[in-house]
Amino acid sequence: MYTLLARRDFRTFIAGQTLSTLGDHAVFVALGVWVKELTGSSSAAGLVLLAYTAPLLLLPVGGYLADRFPRRPVLLVTNLSLVLGSLPLLTVDGPSDAWVIHAVAAGYGLASAVTGPALSAVLRELVSGEADFGAAAALSQSVRSAVTLLAPLLGASLLGWAGGRAFTLVNMALLLGAVAAFLLLKGEGAAAPPQAPAPVDVMGGLRHLRASEGIRRLLVALTALTFAVGLLQPMLYTLIEDGLRRDPRFMGVLETVLAVGSLAGSVAGGFLIGRLGPRRMVMTGAALFGAGAGLLLVAELPVVLAGLVITGAAIPAAVIGLATAAQAATPARLMGRMQAVVNLCLTVPQALSLGVGSALVAVLSFRQVTAVMIAGAAVSALLLGRPGVRDAVGRRVPDRRPSTDPMT
């Protein structure tokens, strides 16, 4: 990892990725808060979330664009488009302008469907060696996970402190910083491929993942875990009311604790992936989530806070395992479409489980819903726990001790 950070081109890529992801995800909560302040309507604020997430269904198209065209220009054009697309926010002056915020949020969601696959594809070109790429993918995913978690909190805080126009200007500056970093990027990641990939269908990444037994098993296991994680948010409201006997506003405290755990999981995952390997990394994430959820059954504040730190750390760690394996086992020409399919498979189950969880808490206690979450984590771990299961790149994983190969 330290060898990678000593490379100027890799540091430049990480800087560009960080600024781009920060500018993209800072709007996720901040624009909803802005609409709430303007209109006083929770429904109107909720539409911001819908406007941002709905375009993510086009992730396969974004992955195709990242594979069909030179990747660095795709990142440059996308980030510059966000800068220009943010300009209408500077005109927002009252409740009647809320539609402008909704439209800009949709634009950011559409851009996110492109930048995620393109960033993975650039990284693949930048670090071609398998050993180096395992560490590079882990570090990149760790940084991306940490920024994704912190960006909404920072964006909402800036908007509350300085107002909507100041937030917009700062966010535009972040995106321009990303553009500058991608312009400075040297080496393979900066240059267009000698020949653009042939125009193939947008689901080429799905066919690749289906043909890779190890990656397919990791993806199914993490999808099960992600569905269980989606039940957490609705359950917390009933835990606060029936277990902790607190005001609903206490959710803000619990969300902060979850974010701290997620940040810790992102950082730790970057260091542990080389020792545990993808399969054990995903298993560890599932086990952590189940253990943390088990602590929530106690319904005593110190124990609940400890449980949320553990559950918060679980998902980033598991995602790092899957992302590292999938990226390392995918040829450069399919990297964008592969990453798009992975992102889609993690986004849709969590969105569905939010709806299922909202229905379950109406008929079940928080302990019963938590038991369902623990069962989901157990299923995820069991899917990967059989001895001799092949890893994501086709080798057999030793079962007696962790491997030092970052891809086992």
Image (spheres, helix red, strand yellow):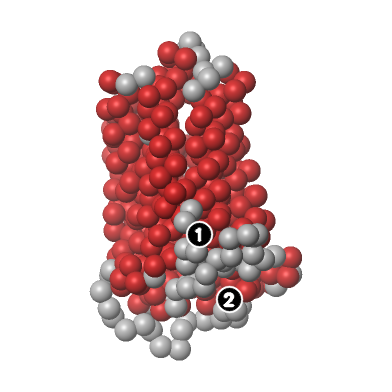
Q: Residue at x 39, y 67 (%)?
A: 213
Q: Nearer the viewer, mark 2 or mark 1?
A: 1
Please report whichever mark, 2 or 1, sits nearer to the chain's N-terminal start.
2
Splitting the image into 4 quarters, where does residue 378 fall? top left
Amino acid at pointer 1:
Pro
Quarter residue 204 falls in: bottom left
Secondary element under disc 1, as helix, strand or loop, is: loop
User: Seen in the image, is 405 located left or right of residue 258?
Assistant: right
Q: Looking at the figure, which quarter contains the N terminus?
A: bottom right
As displayed, is residue 248 above or below residue 74?
above
Q: What amino acid is found at the position of numbered circle 2 in the picture?
A: Glu
Quadrant placement of the C terminus = bottom right
Vertical placement of 88 versus 292: above or below?
below
Task: Provide residue 81's location: percent of width, then percent of height.
Answer: 40, 60
Q: Which mark is residue 130?
A: 2
Q: Where residue 387 is drawn, which disc sits there?
A: 1
